[in-house]
Image (cartoon, rainbow, N blue to C red):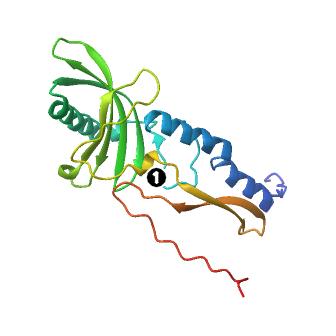
Amino acid sequence: MAPATTTRYYEYSDEEEDDQEDDMMMTPEQRETYWKMVEESSGFEVPDFPPGLDLGQIAPIKSMRGHMKDLKFCCQLAIEHYKQEEGKEIKFVKILKANGQICAPINYYITFEAKDLSGKVDVYQALVHLNCDSEKSEVGIMRLRPETGNPTVTRSSSCSTHCAALEQPQVGHHATRTRYGKRKRQGSIISQQPILCAAPEEKPQVDHHAA
């Protein structure tokens, strides 16, 4: 004879689901820290925070295995650019870390080791705008990793695109009603121009209270 079964009921409120969604988003404090680190490091040192409301968020690549082919290609492109701009020849050694930013199709912020002809190994940082057509990929930054601070960035003479990833977008805060009827404040992007891709057009705001 089969054992008797007992039906159990679990309560799950809309507020709990709302709270879980909030936990998966960047808090205002985290967002402030994130943009401070982006500004100070030019995007090469960013915290591993949840997604925010900003377009084109830069995030650490936790597993580089699936990106390794593209990352090595970007390093080599940056090394060739460095040779042309600085007249110095260096050879790739290994990748230390990388951050990614989804944007037509992706921008890579790579920290890697390379050695000069004497065998001296240094740490370099490269921002490469990887295009679907690899021949159209561009180097935005190629430099020795700064010891402290964020020195003036020298951009590629062939890279005419403005690096909006390093600029904090203007954010307007407004109260909005969620799909559960709960009101909360959230940010909305007012203006930002991601690299190599156009931001979606915004619908004009209509003041229904205007006379």
Where residue 74 appears, as percent x and y from the top left, is 26, 39
Q: Residue at left 73%, top 58%?
A: 18
Q: Nearer the viewer, residue 149 or 38?
A: 149
Where residue 127 appears, as percent x and y from the top left, is 33, 39
Q: Is 158 left, or right, of 111 in this rendering?
A: left
Q: Residue at left 63%, top 50%?
A: 25
Q: Residue at left 71%, top 67%?
A: 178
User: Which residue position holds label 1?
Assistant: 56
Q: Choose top left, top right, bottom left or bottom right for residue 150.
A: top left
Tell me if I can see residue 207 in this picture.
Answer: yes
Where residue 102 appears, as percent x and y from the top left, is 41, 51
Query: Where's the C terminus, which quadrant?
Result: bottom right
Q: Secondary structure at mark 1?
A: loop
Q: Residue at left 77%, top 65%?
A: 183
Q: Choose top left, top right, bottom left or bottom right for residue 92.
A: top left
Q: Nearer the viewer, residue 61 or 190?
A: 190
**Extreme-bottom residue of the structure:** 211
Tell me if I can see residue 48 in this picture.
Answer: no
Q: Nearer the viewer, residue 29 or 151?
A: 151
